[in-house]
Image (spheres, grey):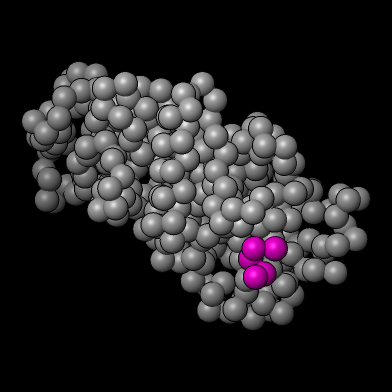
């Protein structure tokens, strides 16, 4: 019987999302279809960064002795930035997802954009705003006005404001005017983090999942609906090209915008499957006739190759 550790929780502000996604995987591993093949272990990383194995604090040596493979469902900081991957690699624990270097590249949106642009993949124009430092930046009002005008002078609205390295749980702001941008730059949640401001590309959004070594293809992409055959072909090519050029592992999920005038732009890519209720991945799997159990078994098999 294969011993599978599901790593969930974590120190980021996406703790609850990770608990839910990892909990869903544990339920599947423990159901009657799989419980004779796998022994599932709940590997919880609490908000203080303490690791637990089925509720008992554990060190990495003991963890490595207790499981054969790990399914990583830690979202955000520590889970998607290469840190947990480095720990698992150092203890020779096979794990699902992408390696530490690829995870680190994808987690930082500025580094990711530079890598994609270098490989011929278009992304929206952007500017990086470092976290506010009172001693260096001075009065908040003047700081917000200065940074807003820097953005205004680089590209026209609408603008999208995102955390530079965080995930989905921190709100994304859309600003259409300079006063709106100034207001957002003064928000406490924005002042304390580095952010990325992007131009908004108007068009139709497309989401694709890419699975490695699936149905006879090295990289298999799920295709979005409501697009022409030519657009689907280009989206599939871009999604698999992004996965390949970033050196990603068993799975990725990409988001694009298709502009009638400007073409296709890459907006986002994630290396971790989100298996919470009604998650986009479940729809992608359903569209190609794959259930969650089949997906879980597939990524476990890939991790053990």
As rendered, which of 226 and 171 lies closer to the eye?
226
- Viewport quadrant of the N terminus: bottom right
Q: Is residue 304 magenta?
A: yes
Going by the image, does 290 lie left or right of 119? right
- Residue 149: percent from the left, percent from the top? 10, 30
Residue at (73%, 59%) from the top-left corner? 42
Figure check: 109 above or below 104: above
Report if residue 252 is visible in the image: yes
Residue at (62%, 74%) from the top-left corner? 93
- Viewport quadrant of the C terminus: bottom right
Figure check: 262 above or below 95: above
Count of numbered labels shown in the rendering: 0
Q: In which quarter of the image is residue 237?
A: top left
Going by the image, does 182 lie left or right of 68? left
- Residue 100: percent from the left, percent from the top? 46, 66
As rendered, which of 249 and 137 lies closer to the eye?
249
Going by the image, does 91 lie left or right of 81? right
Residue at (66%, 32%) from the top-left corner? 287
Magenta-highlighted residues = 301-305
Figure check: 19 above or below 58: above
- Residue 36: percent from the left, percent from the top? 90, 61
Residue at (19%, 41%) from the top-left corner? 127
Which SS does the magenta portion mostly show? Answer: helix
Going by the image, does 91 lie left or right of 119? right
As rendered, which of 189 and 200 lies closer to the eye?
200
Report if residue 187 is visible in the image: no
- Residue 118: percent from the left, percent from the top? 25, 53
């Amino acid at each position: 019987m294969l011993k599978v550790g599901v790593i969930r929780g974590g120190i980021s502000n996406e703790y609850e999302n990770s608990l839910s996604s990892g909990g869903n995987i544990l339920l599947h591993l423990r159901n009657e279809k799989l419980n004779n093949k796998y022994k599932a272990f709940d590997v919880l990383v609490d908000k203080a960064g303490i690791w637990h194995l089925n509720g008992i604090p554990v060190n990495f040596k003991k963890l490595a002795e207790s499981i054969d493979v790990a399914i990583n469902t830690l979202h955000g900081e520590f889970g998607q930035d290469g840190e947990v991957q480095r720990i698992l690699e150092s203890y020779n624990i096979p794990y699902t997802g992408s390696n530490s270097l690829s995870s680190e590249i994808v987690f930082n949106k500025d580094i990711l954009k530079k890598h994609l642009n270098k490989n011929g993949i278009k992304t929206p124009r952007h500017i990086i705003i470092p976290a506010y430092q009172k001693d260096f930046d001075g009065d908040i009002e003047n700081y917000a006005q200065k940074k807003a005008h820097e953005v205004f002078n680089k590209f026209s609205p609408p603008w999208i404001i995102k955390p530079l390295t965080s995930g989905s749980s921190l709100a994304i702001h859309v600003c259409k005017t300079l006063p709106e941008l100034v207001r957002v730059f003064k928000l406490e949640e924005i002042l304390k983090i580095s952010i990325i401001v992007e131009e908004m590309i108007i068009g139709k959004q497309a989401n694709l999942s890419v699975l490695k070594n699936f149905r006879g293809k090295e990289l298999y992409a799920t295709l979005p609906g409501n697009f022409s055959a030519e657009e689907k072909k280009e989206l599939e090519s871009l999604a698999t090209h992004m996965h390949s050029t970033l050196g990603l592992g068993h799975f990725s999920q990409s988001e694009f915008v298709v502009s009638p005038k400007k073409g296709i732009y890459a907006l986002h890519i994630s290396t971790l499957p989100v298996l919470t209720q009604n998650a986009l991945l479940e729809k992608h799997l359903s569209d190609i006739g794959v259930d969650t159990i089949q997906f879980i078994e597939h990524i476990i098999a890939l991790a053990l190759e």
